Amino acid sequence: MKKPIIGISSNVFELEKGLFAGYKRAYVDISYINAVINAGGVPHLLPLNEHEEIIEEFVKNVDGIVLTGGADVFPLLYGEEPKEKLGEIFPERDKFDSLLIRFAMAYKKPILGICRGMQIINVECGGSLYQDLSYNENIAIKHFQKARSHTPTHSINVASNSFLTDIYPEGVGFINSYHHQIVNQLAPGFVVTAKSADGAIEAIENISDDTFVIGVQWHPEMMAVNDEAAQKLFKKFINEVNSRKKY
């Protein structure tokens, strides 16, 4: 069996100083690459662009998609004006990721959304976000940690009978956290599969014979260097990609 090809959505980095100031480069954090390799997949970077036919070809030529973290999702996409605490936005990235999601679902390719990746999945599929944690009065724990990236800093409660259940068999997990936005209205067709102690939605999924879309609000690719649960998450996703792959 050939190893599955996993498309990883990339970002754009603009050099600020030196001879090439203003020069833009496509990039992705290497932790995503290593997590996919160590889980048995072949990482394939998908450079950000606005050409629908190119993005469709990306999706057709990979077996699964990982949507990476990044800037805030543009709130007009879910019918809200920008609020004071909205962070940096990148509308071109919104369009790119939305098209990846749309084509992946059309071609029945599994999707794993991480942090912003989960948020853009929820928005593209008809849900909404809190533009900042402070706009939800129930939030009471720290969701943007001041600790090393692989360090878990808060707990999650995991639903039974979900993708995450056998990864966290006790029903409780410990994760890292680097976000200031969370899911508000859940997209139709999705279910919540994990929450933090203050009720923030930490994982969602939409799984059927024709659809496999999961999202996690934390960064398992950062934790995968030494965390068994994070490693299992990627391995289980790769196995799912393999089982749904068309040969």
Image (spheres, rainbow, N blue to C red):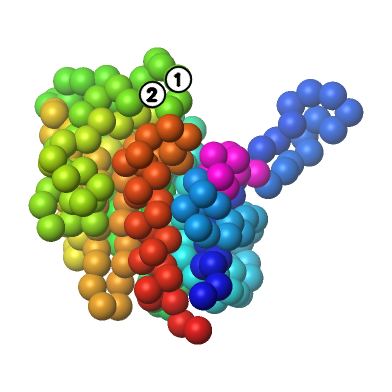
Report whether 95 appears left or right of 53: left
Magenta span contains residue 184: no
Looking at this rendering, what residue extends furthest in the right direction? 19
Q: Residue at x 54, y 39 (%)?
A: 31
Q: How would you rate the neighbour count of disc 2 (Cα within 10 Å): few for under 14, some for 14-19, many for 20 or more?
A: some
- Tell me, yes or no, if residue 41 can be seen here: yes
- Tell me, yes or no, if residue 115 can be seen here: no
Residue 25 occupies which quadrant of the picture?
top right
Please provide the residue range marked out in magenta: 27-34
Amino acid at pointer 2: Thr
Query: Where is mark 2, residue-wise?
Result: 151
Give above or below for 21 relative to 230: above
Query: Residue 54, position in %: x, y?
Result: 63, 70
Label 1 element class: loop
Looking at this rendering, what residue extends furthest in the front direction? 1
Amino acid at pointer 1: Arg
**Majority secondary structure of the magenta segment?**
helix
Query: Residue 235, position in %: x, y?
Result: 40, 54
Q: Residue at x 32, y 45 (%)?
A: 216
Query: Where is mark 1, residue-wise?
Result: 148
Label 2 element class: loop
Residue closer to the observer: 200 or 3: 3
Give above or below for 21 relative to 240: above
Magenta span contains residue 29: yes
Q: How many marks?
A: 2
Query: Residue 194, position in %: x, y?
Result: 18, 43
Report whether 182 appears left or right of 194: right
In three-dimensional space, the C-alpha distance between marks 1 and 2, rounded to whole angstroms, equals 5 Å
Residue closer to the observer: 80 or 38: 38
Residue closer to the observer: 22 or 159: 159
Q: Residue at x 84, y 33 (%)?
A: 20
